[in-house]
Amino acid sequence: MFCLDVHYADASATVAAVVFASWTDAVAIKETTLTLPVAAGYEPGEFYKRELPCLMAAIESLDEMPGLILIDGYVWLGASRPGLGARLYEALDGKVPVVGVAKTAFQGQTEAVEVYRGGSRRPLFVTAAGVSAQEMAERVSQMHGEYRLPTLIKRADQLCRGRV
């Protein structure tokens, strides 16, 4: 499984990939970061145009195709409105399930499964393509870490922001 995250600074983007074998792992098997030029400017409602090339570059840089990908964000923005995760799933020809773990609510999103972790009063919002969002929400709730954000998702965020 891969956990991917992207951070932008000026005209570049840093994408981090954290590879792990089990939902309960505390430590990654492999970690990598790539810094790339920003492929596109920010366009409201078209976020995937900016981030998808970064995610694809990270996937292509690793030795193997993942069995599942976790992203920081939404797979679906609404009932039939694709988000970044759905675009990634489509770019991978539907061969790799994609799970979105978002930290903030998205207006109009009614499909996300809320996950409360670590005594937090604020949920994580789980959406998925190629696999059940409900099942993935259960898996996210079992991930290592005592806080709201699971350890390996937080690790990907720290890596792409250069905070390690």
Image (tube, rainbow, N blue to C red):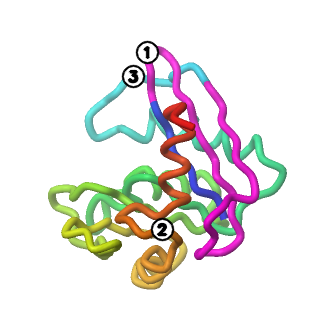
Q: Look at the image and say whether residue 16 sits in the magenta stretch.
A: yes
Q: Do the residues labelled 1 and 3 touch (CB within 8 Å)?
A: no
Task: Give the residue number, with chain letter if any, for mark 1.
Answer: 10
Depth check: give the residue in front, 44 or 135.
135
Depth check: give the residue in front, 33 or 146.
146
Residue placed at 71% from the left, 62% from the top? Answer: 66
Nearer to us: label 1 or label 3: 1
Task: Give the residue number, with chain letter if any, for mark 2.
Answer: 145
Instruction: Locate the N terminus by quadrant.
Output: bottom right
**Classed neighbour count for the residue bearing mark 1: other residues with Cα under 10 Å, few (<14), some (14–19), many (≥20):** few
Nearer to us: label 1 or label 2: 2
**Classed neighbour count for the residue bearing mark 2: other residues with Cα under 10 Å, few (<14), some (14–19), many (≥20):** some
Residue placed at 43% from the left, 41% from the top? Answer: 48
Q: Is residue 118 above or below residue 108?
A: below
**Classed neighbour count for the residue bearing mark 3: other residues with Cα under 10 Å, few (<14), some (14–19), many (≥20):** few
Nearer to us: label 2 or label 3: 2
Q: Position of residue 85 (x, y in %)?
A: 46, 56
Q: In what element is the residue under mark 1?
A: loop
Residue range in magenta is 8-35
Give residue 104's quadrant in the image: bottom left
Task: Give the residue number, with chain letter if any, for mark 3.
Answer: 41
Amino acid type at mark 3:
Gly
Q: How far apart, in angstroms, are the residues tagged by discs 1 and 2?
A: 32 Å
Q: Look at the image and say whether residue 31 sits in the magenta stretch.
A: yes
N-terminal label among 1 and 3 = 1
